[in-house]
Image: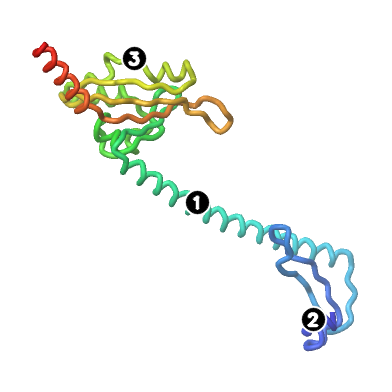
C-alpha cells in the first residue's frame, strides 16, 4: 500500500484491514480500519469488518434501486401524461374495456359525445349501461346501442377485429358512430378485453339519407 496509497506514507499507517463496498456488482469504495502501529487481526475482526462492508454494499444497492425506481416512476408519469394528452386531443372516441365490458380507459371525446361524464377517470370500472341508465334517470332520451348488435361480445367470441355502425339517441339527439373494435390481448397472450375507436359520422349519414330521399322524389 505504501506505493499505491499516499495516505499510508502521509499518516504512517502500519496495519490495515479492509473489504470492498460493492454496488451493482462494481466496487465503489471500501470499509477499512487502519492503525499507525503494527497490529494483528483475528478472524472475528475480519468477519466483523466483512459483515459491515456487506451491509454497506446492500445499502448502496438499495439506494441505487430506489433512485432508479423514482426515475422510472417519473418517466412513467410523463409518458402517461403524454398518452393522455394525445388521446384527449383526438376527436374520435377511444376506449378499452375488460372482459366484463367495464372501462379500463376512455378519452375525453368518449366522455363528451357518448357516456356524458366530465372526466375520463370517472369512466373507469363502469359500463356503457351504467351511463345510459344515469342519462335516463336524469330525464334524457338515451337509446344509443339498443338496436345495435352486441359488438363487444362478437369481438370476444371471434377474437378478431370488426367494424360496426352503432347509433341511437344521446341526450335527445341522434348519434351515429363508425366503430372499429379489436381484441385486447394481455402481455401473456391472453384475452383481457376489447379496445375500440369510434368516429362520429352522424352528419355524413344524415346527408346520405337526405340525398336518397331527394333522388326518390325526382324518379
Q: Nearer the viewer, residue 7 or 76?
A: 76
| C-alpha separation, residue under disc 1 versus residue under disc 3 | 41 Å
- Residue 179 appears at what percent x and percent y? 34, 25
How packed is label 1: few (under 14 Cα within 10 Å), some, or many (20 or more)?
few
Question: Is tag 1's residue or tag 3's residue first in the polypeptide sequence?
Answer: 1
Q: Which numbered disc, 3 or 2, marks the residue that appears first in the sequence?
A: 2
Spot the residue most to the front. 219
The residue positioned 13% from the left and 12% from the top of the image is: 216
| Among the two numbered marks 1 and 2 on one chain, the one whose residue lies closer to the N terminus | 2
Residue furthest to the top? 219
Q: Residue at x 56, y 58 (%)?
A: 67
Helix, strand or loop at label 1? It is: helix
Image quadrant containing the N terminus:
bottom right
Q: Nearer the viewer, residue 36 or 132?
A: 132
Please report the residue visible at 27 percent of the width from the left and 13 percent of the height from the top.
Answer: 147
Tell me if 1 is positioned left or right of 122 in this view.
right
Percent of width and height locating residue 211: 15, 20
Q: How is the image coloured?
A: rainbow
Q: Does 128 sit left or right of 48 as displayed?
A: left
Label 3 sits on residue: 149
Quadrant, the C terminus: top left
The residue carrying pointer 3 sits among few (fewer than 14), some (14 to 19) or many (20 or more) residues within 10 Å by Cα, namely: few
Amino acid at each position: 500500500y505504501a506505493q499505491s496509497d499516499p495516505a499510508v506514507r502521509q499518516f504512517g499507517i502500519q496495519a490495515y484491514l479492509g473489504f470492498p463496498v460493492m454496488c451493482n456488482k462494481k466496487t465503489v469504495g471500501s470499509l477499512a480500519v487502519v492503525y499507525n502501529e503494527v497490529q494483528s487481526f483475528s478472524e472475528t475482526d475480519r468477519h466483523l469488518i466483512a459483515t459491515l462492508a456487506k451491509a454497506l454494499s446492500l445499502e448502496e444497492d438499495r439506494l441505487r434501486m430506489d433512485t432508479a425506481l423514482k426515475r422510472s416512476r417519473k418517466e412513467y408519469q410523463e409518458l402517461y401524461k403524454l398518452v393522455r394528452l394525445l388521446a384527449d386531443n383526438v376527436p374520435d372516441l377511444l376506449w378499452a374495456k375488460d372482459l366484463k365490458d367495464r372501462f379500463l380507459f376512455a378519452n375525453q371525446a368518449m366522455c363528451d359525445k357518448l357516456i356524458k361524464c366530465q372526466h375520463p377517470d370517472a369512466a373507469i370500472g363502469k359500463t356503457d349501461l351504467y351511463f345510459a341508465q344515469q342519462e335516463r334517470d336524469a330525464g334524457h332520451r338515451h337509446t344509443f346501442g339498443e338496436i345495435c348488435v352486441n359488438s363487444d361480445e362478437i369481438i370476444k367470441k371471434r377474437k378478431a377485429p370488426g367494424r360496426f355502425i352503432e347509433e341511437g339517441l344521446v341526450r335527445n339527439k341522434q348519434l351515429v358512430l363508425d366503430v372499429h373494435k379489436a381484441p385486447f390481448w394481455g402481455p401473456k397472450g391472453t384475452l383481457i378485453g376489447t379496445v375500440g375507436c369510434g368516429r362520429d359520422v352522424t352528419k355524413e349519414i344524415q346527408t346520405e339519407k337526405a340525398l336518397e330521399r331527394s333522388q326518390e322524389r325526382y324518379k
